[in-house]
Image (cartoon, rainbow, N blue to C red):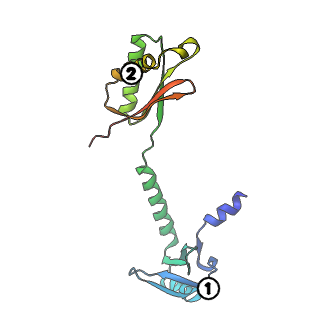
Amino acid sequence: MSNTNNNNDRLKINEGIRAPELRVLLDDGSSEVMKRDDALKLAHDQGLDLIEITAKANPPVAKITDYGKYVYDQKKKQKEIKSRQNIVEVKNIQVRVGTGEADLKLKADRASEWLREGHRVKAELYIRGRTKYMEKDFLHSRLENVLKMIDEEYKIVEDYKESPKGIAILIEPVKKK
C-alpha cells in the first residue's frame, strides 16, 4: 500500500508526463499553454528536463529546468522551513500538598530553566485520598507557592483546571522583543 503513495509523490519528468496539454513556465517568468510533445522538444533543445510541478491544475503546470537542480532546491526549501519551525515541548512538574519548601524551590528552579529554554511548563498539584476534599482555595494557594518561586517571566496559558491527577496550570515564557 505504501508503494502507491510513494509513486504519487514522485515527480513526473519528460516522457513520464501523460497530460496531452501543459502550461509551461518559461525562464522569463511567463507561462504558455502548449502540447506535451512541443514542450518536450523545447526542453530537449535546451538540454533540460520537463518537470510536472502541479498535476491537479487544468492544464497541469510544468517547468523546463535541470531535474537535479530542481530536486536540490526543493530539498533546500524543505530544510529551511523545518529549521524555522519552533518545537515547543510541554514539561511537567508535580507537587503534592505536603511537599516541603526546599523541594518546591527545586521544582521552581527546574521550571525556570525550562522557561528560559522556551518550553511550556505544566505545574500539577497531585491530589489523592483525603486531600481531594480540601478547600479549592487552599489547593490553589499550594500551586501558587510554586509559581511565585519561578524566576523567569511567564504568562498563564491555561488557568487552574481539573486534571486526572489533581489540579494543573499551564504556563509559557513571555516572548522578549
Name the N-terminal-most of marks 1 and 2: 1
Mark identifier at residue 131: none
What residue is rendered at 42% in x and 13% in y?
A: 103
- Residue 4 location, x and y as percent? 70, 63
Q: CA distance from mark 1 to mark 2?
A: 69 Å
- Residue 23 location, x and y as percent? 51, 82
Write down the residue under mark 2.
144
Callout 2 secondary element: helix
Callout 1 secondary element: loop
Q: Most extreme residue toward the left, as rendered?
A: 177
Mark identifier at residue 20: 1
Which residue type does callout 1 highlight? Pro
Residue 135 in the image: above or below residue 7: above
> In the shown orientation, is residue 94 left or right of residue 55?
left
What residue is rendered at 64% in x and 66% in y?
A: 8
Q: Nearer the viewer, residue 31 or 90?
A: 90
Mark 1 vs mark 2: in front:
2
What residue is rendered at 31% in x and 25% in y?
A: 151
Picture quarter containing residue 29?
A: bottom left
- Residue 67 location, x and y as percent? 52, 71
> In the shown orientation, is residue 175 left or right of residue 107?
left
Residue 5 in the image: above or below residue 158: below
Give the quarter of the figure containing the N terminus.
bottom right
Residue 78 in the image: above or below residue 71: above
Residue 119 in the image: above or below residue 64: above
